[in-house]
Amino acid sequence: MLVLVCWGGSKLYGEWQERHALRRAAAFLSGGDVKAAALSARRAFQLNPHSLEAVRMLATIQEVAAVPTALDWRRMAVQMAPGSAADKIALASCALKFAEIPIAAKTLAEVGEGDKTVAYHAAAGQLAEAQNKLQEAREHWARAAQLAPGEKEYEMRLATVKLRLPDPADREMARATLQELRKVSGQRTAATRALIADGANRRSSQVVLKLAQELKDYPEASFQDALLYLDILKQLRHPDYTSYLTEIETKAAANANDLALLIAWMNKNKLSALALNYTNGLDAKILNVWPVPLTIAESYSNLSDWAGLEALAKAHPWEGFEFLRHAYLARAFREQGQSVAAEREWTAAKKEASGQAKLVSALVRTVIEWRWVDEAADLLWTLTKDPAQKEEALSSLYRYYSEAGDTGGLFRTLLRLVEIMPQDLSLQNNMAQLGLLLGAEPERVRKIAADLHRKEPKNPAFLSTYAFSLYSKGDAAGAVEAMAALPQEKLREPAYAAYYGVFLAAAGETEKAWVYLQLGSGVKLLPEEKALLEKAQSKIAAPAAE
């Protein structure tokens, strides 16, 4: 009995410790001490790894700190409580904060009709805006405002959406709402920014200037608001531009984040030489605080000062961002013709980022800006192994191979896309078509083409692929007969006309084939498609030459 009492007491004490750690975490977080809050929440999780509240607290803390791993904690919460709509909505909201649109869309789609709370409509409104579905966004924000009539933020979000709608009455009503919200503490900065954007769209320069000046003088205004005012002064060639730039340079020198924003603004406005001259007079300590080194690296890159970039990237470690330092060194060496050193640094960049999808994604975005397309494709294939990133990575690969005209790469990408989206018939059709072009997995892709045609016999894309499968087996007459089921206006569209011309030429209908081959000659084709067209044209040209 004593053993049982002691064990029970120990368990209760452990539960008390967990609750105490969570209370401390909440208190620290409300007081703005994110680091202490994280330590307390971690302690609670260590005491009980099955604690849903500890997982939720850790997710909240990392969201406040803008740490992407917050998504992992939100996912864990959903796994621990799969029936909790609140956790799903929280995951979707978190995904939106980190621009993970596919995750947000998929998660919100799993929320049942009866669980569509205010938080759901707020998240759905943000998602619809991110997808540029403005009418849908309007509906969600209107519903959120209706469910929470005292919440001014929802009124503000609804008004900002209305400003982008085509109806002048909607826009006028939105402006009136935003003017009222400028009187509300906590909403006036957002409302003023929205009115500035609206004024810019209407080219009301004096209205924009006045609003921007008021905005940057609000006590709660951000440094970005000051930059917005600076940007407007520059665009208007206002006489106060130079003096305000000097003022803002002095202000930015005391804060690394503000300094990085200012240098990035200078880079964007083709003032990189001025940015470097400005930073040369600053304290070396602040220049080494992230993300300042990255913005200075961009300044050197913009000026093609590769020796300067090399010196910068060699000077100090970029704590937590060594993968980018190695990447910039690789670029500096490559631009200076030092291929061995460039390859060494690029390998180091990939190694530093490996196993961390967020870092790999950042590296992809960086090299795409440099037009390092082969390196970007290599990294994207790495991302296809990450469950949260694979769909977006494969979509990016599809665009890349399409632009490059790489049929093999497209086919390889489609094979993976079909694996993860087996219900998408259009993807299956594209895969079958490319497989036929390449002669890859012929039996499989012919079966897919036949199955799709049977499911949707009037679908022009499916019918065309089915006809191509007949042609690839040597049945040119069957291909012509199948294509003839399409309406004349569809057959004369370049993409279909090119294939129809090829089939006609193979069936011996040379005069008719020539018409369709001419119609299809202007369309963008893959190398294998061009070869098919040229072969068909040569068959027609030979009799004419005689």
Image (cartoon, rainbow, N blue to C red):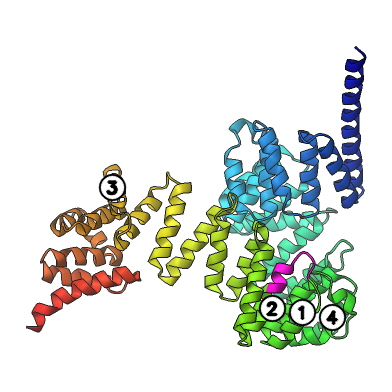
Q: Residue at x 60, y 82 (%)?
A: 339
Earlier-in-chain disc, 2 versus 3:
2
Earlier-in-chain disc, 4 versus 1:
4
Circle 4: residue type: Tyr
Q: For mark 3, give the secondary structure.
A: helix
Kindly report which numbered mark, 4 or 1, lies closer to the viewer in this rendering. Answer: 1
Kindly report which numbered mark, 2 or 3, lies closer to the viewer in this rendering. Answer: 2
Estimate how packed mark 2 is, as few (under 14), some (14 to 19) or many (20 or more) residues with alpha carbons within 10 Å: many
Q: Say whether residue 233 is left or right of residue 513.
A: right
> What whole-number distance in Å separates the C-alpha atoms at marks 4 and 3?
69 Å
Q: Is residue 396 visible?
A: yes
Q: Which mark is residue 447?
A: 3
Q: Are marks 1 and 3 in contact (CB under 8 Å)?
A: no
Circle 2: residue type: Leu
> What whole-number distance in Å separates the C-alpha atoms at marks 1 and 2?
8 Å
Which residue position holds label 1?
A: 314
Which residue position holds label 2?
A: 329
Which residue position holds label 4?
A: 244
Q: For mark 1, give the secondary structure.
A: helix
Q: Are marks 2 and 3 in contact (CB under 8 Å)?
A: no
